[in-house]
Amino acid sequence: MTANLLDYDLEGLAGFCASLGEKRFRATQLFRWIHQKGARDFAQMTDLAKSLRDKLEGSARIEGLPVLTQHESADGTIKWLFDVGNGDAVEAVFIPEDDRGTLCISSQAGCAVGCRFCSTGHQGFSRNLSTGEILAQLWFAEHFLRAHLQTNGERVISNVVMMGMGEPLQNYAALVPALRVMLDDHGYGLSRRRVTVSTSGVVPMIDRLGEDCPVALAVSLHAPDDELRDKLVPLNRKYPIADLLDACNRYLEHAPRDFITFEYCMLDGVNDQPEHARQLAELVQRHRGRGVSCKLNLIPFNPFPASGLVRSPQQSVQAFAKIL
């Protein structure tokens, strides 16, 4: 079986090239061809020695994910569904804005966390994605968009958010090399401030991420107390809010931003009342006497029948936001 070179960060690719008897600078050249230029064929890599290209033809491949569907909205948002085999598919979404282009990427086929308001969680968990499958979403989207938008090779995606299907920190071994490729100047050259990992609160892995590869962090909070969060985010039973907020403060010692983003999905009559807003404000301002430096992102709920939940009306969202 040949090696899929999308599975390697630069260090991994250097090790692979060394196994072929090649020096490190060849790995850097190869890395640039794959990620900066979107090359799929070793024959395209004209500054590599033919002897190396011949070795690569016999031992390696650059294999993305088959695209099952692509939907483009009037505002330029594009949603792709990628085939990851065995009947599983994952989603990536490109969101264009005036000052940025954001890609939301999946880390797992399905999700084991089972948040009540999340349709992916209701589908259950199938498997972790490999590093190559995580990166394939960015690799495809970036080079498709350059051609689609006719940018003459200029980068389109400025921000990446690990906020598609799955809990990224439950696929840590594949996640970190993928993040390193996103950040590498020979890869996508993204700023640590512009790469975000969104988590439901896997406390030990938040600490590890702070040590191994600190990027921006978003935490799915969704409730101001443990009783309610236990019902909405089952992981809270293992890592309650106080432990989670402690981990957030520890993460801020390493983070490229001076705040954590707390995501809060607005659910009608469940977590959107004025008393919830007051509890939430007090929670983040007074935790352990120091609070947590944060921004709160109020998210509209996307209804699906199995949830039994309803999106908060706009007037409730506005009243909630005023209290915060």
Image (spheres, rainbow, N blue to C red):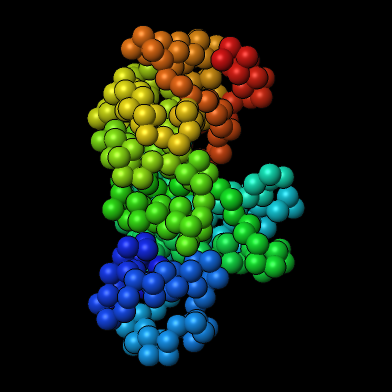
Q: Quadrant of the C terminus?
A: top right
Percent position of residue 119, x then y: 46, 44
Q: Is any atom of residue 322 visible in this view? A: yes
Residue at left offset 41%, top offset 35%? 255
Percent position of residue 320, x then y: 59, 17
Percent position of residue 294, x then y: 48, 24
**As drawn, 178 above or below 265:** below
Residue 237 occupies quadrant? top left
**As drawn, 118 above or below 269:** below
Q: Is any atom of residue 64 visible in this view? A: no
Residue at left offset 53%, top offset 44%? 194
Q: Quadrant of the N terminus?
A: bottom left
Q: Say left or right for 1 vs 263.
A: left
**As drawn, 167 above or below 41:** above
Between residue 15 and residue 297, name the one nearer to us. 15
Residue at left offset 36%, top offset 29%? 253
Q: Say left or right for 190 vs 213.
A: right
Between residue 240 and residue 148, name the one nearer to us. 148
Percent position of residue 155, x then y: 62, 59
Residue at left offset 28%, top offset 81%? 20
